[in-house]
Amino acid sequence: MTTTSRRRAGAARAGARAGIADVARLAGVSTATVSRALASPGVVSATTRDRVLQAVRETGYTPHVAAQNLRARRTMMVLVVVPDIANPFFAEVLHGIEDTLAAAGYGLLIGNLANSVAKEGRYVDLVFAGQVDGVLLLNGGIPASAGRGMAESGVPIVAACEAIPKAPFPQVEIQNREASIAVAALLAQLGHRRFAYIAGPRGNVLEKERNAGFRKGLAAAGFDAASLVQFDGDFTFRAGADAARRFMAMQPRPTAVYAANDEMAIGFLKAVRAAGIQVPRDVSVVGFDGIDYADYAEPTLTTVRQPRNALGATAAGLLIDLMTGKTRAKPGLTRLEISLLVRGSTGPAPGATTARGG
């Protein structure tokens, strides 16, 4: 019987579950080296790692995950900071995040800001206390409390959905400006000459990009500022309905309305149809995001569809690479492409046969 066989047989005769000491003896290394080879394989040589893994297979050793995480000071949890969990846009983003994290053995905690300074402070404290291994920011800003920002904690961070200017970590976003240029081009091609834009919250980075893109697209089609009226909004259904009331008080009215997100577009669409205004015969309506509700609006909503699952999955993948040491934290922007879905809520402008591009 070989030495290896005798050791293996000895462990089997003992009838006890193999421990890390058994692996160390069989591999001819210390228990500390076994721990490093299993928890951080990149810090040991390939030869040593192979010996340890072979010993693990021969002994049938199963690491105690909780204890291993404790020694490595890992929680295997990720904090996902969301501006408003009630917004249906984030549902599919979170699916992409959760699926990707789960495949790598991580769980997630959802931090719903909901415009609460107190909540923001609690999430900052949680990160500084070492309760999570990484953070995904979907809120367009770096949470701060008591004079310290979350980025100062040293915990890996990735932002998604809303870009954070000059952030010192990776970010994932979609082509907001380019998409809005495409919306303007579509409406111009349909013969529209009077336009309305329902804006998102002032200062919001998504609002800025979509607003700028729409104006740029109209200018490229030959329209000046006088052809566009803007209604204030906040990304809610109610804001769309409020914009509809202001729209209905106008004469002449815009024949095409672009809302900075689907919720406002759907709120607008429902309110004008309730007042007897036909969509798209009297007014065309376009949204942004591609949420599920857009598929069930009447008529179905023309919208810019974001790859929401891919947004979440891409951001989570970048964070996993940071947490496991595969990459180093540095500023960088990953931009995902979008698609413009032309559906029932858009059509030719009234009298489009004699209008521009008719």
Image (cartoon, helix red, strand yellow):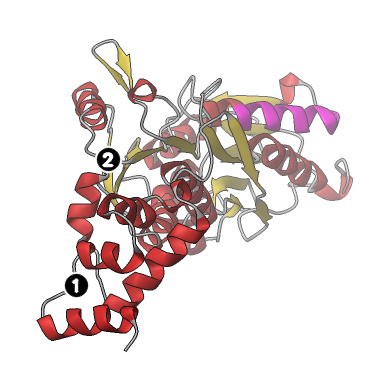
Q: Residue furthest top?
A: 147
**Could you say which is closer to the camera, residue 291 or residue 300?**
291
Q: Residue at x 56, y 46 (%)?
A: 287
Q: Position of residue 290 (x, y in %)?
A: 53, 54
* Mark nearer the viewer, 2 or 1: 1
Please provide the residue range marked out in magenta.
209-222
Disc sitting over residue 18 in the figure? 1
Kindly report the secondary structure that dominates the magenta region of the rendered protein. helix
Whether residue 292 is visible, yes or no, is no
Q: Disc 2 on helix, strand or loop?
A: loop
The residue type indicated by label 1 comes to Ala
Please give the residue where the numbered disc 2 appears in the rendered image.
132
Cα separation, mark 2 vs mark 1, equals 31 Å
Q: Residues within 10 Å of mark 2 (few under 14, many from 20)?
A: many
Q: Earlier in the sequence, mark 2 or mark 1?
A: 1
In this rendering, position of residue 214 left or right of residue 314: right
User: Residue 91, located in which quarter of the rendered image?
Assistant: bottom left
Q: Position of residue 41 (x, y in %)?
A: 43, 53
In this rendering, position of residue 208 left or right of residue 294: right
Looking at the image, residue 65 lies above or below residue 159: below
Image quarter (top left, top right, bottom left or bottom right) of the N terminus: bottom left
Q: Position of residue 263 (x, y in %)?
A: 44, 45
**Could you say which is closer to the camera, residue 356 or residue 136?**
136
The residue type indicated by label 2 comes to Val
